[in-house]
Amino acid sequence: MNTAKQKLMKILICHCNPKLFARLMERPLAGQNVVIQCLAGNNAIAMAAATEPHVILLLENGFGGYPKGLERHFRESGFQMPMLILPADQLDETQLDEVWRRLQGLYRGSVQVERDPENYRVLTEEEFGPGKPKDRASEHAMEVQENRFLALLSAGKAHHCRARAYFQEAMATQRNYEADWTLAVLSGDARGYLWRAQLFRYVSTLAHYIPGVEVDCLPLPHPASQSLDFLHKALTAEAFYALSAIRTFGTNPELDENLWEVGQIETTRGPRLAEDAARLAGWACAMRQAASAHIDLLEACLSKNSESQTSLGHTRHSRNALNIFLHLWGLTRLRGATDGPRDLWALVEQFRAGRKPEGIGVFSSFYEFVDRVQQEEQDRLARN
């Protein structure tokens, strides 16, 4: 007698033969497994993605009698788990037991799945896609976006090298300290709020590109001391300067609102500590990616190497970087529906030929900014 313990399998069974399925499930070896039924071929891919089965069993005569086609569809969609096609012949109980043993033999545990560099879709139980497309922007709105892009190029021409070096140092800071900050979040230590400083280092990377910003007055990309850090109760003046600069210049409304909200989070030892710190950590990761995409795009735009421009948009990675940049600054009208980044490159060539941004103001100096904030606070206290 074989006393080897049966491995628990999660099996997706694709069929439209309830009698055969019922007989299969009555066999003794069926009881120790998790079985998911797929009764419609058009749902098979979504169900496999949602349930992550160890093995897929395809019953012949199901879904029009084309299990080979469904198997090919699974493989073309990138699924790597073992699959077994159950023949249409009448099967007795011994043969049905053999099906379970064959499934056990196929099961290999977790399967290595390599990332497809060019294809990535997300399926959901409901439709959460983008809303209805908006009407095409007016010529005036398009001109505003063109001037905003030219302003980023103009400031980038002066500060891109410094911004790139700043960003590299900020990323090194995260690598060096994120274990400490994460431990603080999980243990209820207020030092978890140091994720706030890291978030606004990435915001400050973007602030290098805002016309008028004094980049020397942005937060340091790392703690001031090799062995000391300081946990502020709220945003420092330098971080608030960076936040105000990019909000005044203009980001997309969703980002603008959320960055303002997380900027208001103050250090506490109360029950919100872990939630606040985790929220700051999440936004730090998102803004790190946004700053990276911005740096990459400006690198291509300001580079004299034409290959860096022509290659943009040709891979999924570069398309994502382009789209992050456009959505970050609300410049989505600069990308034609079919032209890709052509409009951007036309503006880059015009910038190189001497076109200047029009109608874009410069942000305050750090001294003027702090003076204005202090005056507003005095006025508020006087009113109260």
Image (cartoon, rainbow, N blue to C red):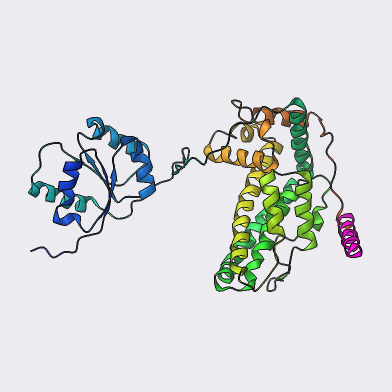
Residue 184, position as x, y percentages in the image: 59, 71
Q: Main secondary structure of the magenta part?
A: helix
Considering depth in this image, is 104 or 140 the residue closer to the camera? 140
Left or right: where 312 falls relative to 103 = right
Residue 190, position as x, y percentages in the image: 64, 72
Left or right: where 354 falls relative to 341 = right
Task: Please report the bounds of the magenta region as a residue range.
Answer: 368-384
Left or right: where 13 falls relative to 145 = left
Residue 379's quadrant in the figure?
A: bottom right
Considering depth in this image, is 342 or 107 the residue closer to the camera? 107
Residue 311, position as x, y percentages in the image: 58, 33
49 falls in the magenta region: no
Give the residue drawn at x 22%, y 59%: 32
Residue 220, position as x, y percentages in the image: 74, 61
Q: Quadrant of the N terminus?
A: bottom left
Considering depth in this image, is 293 or 136 the residue closer to the camera? 136
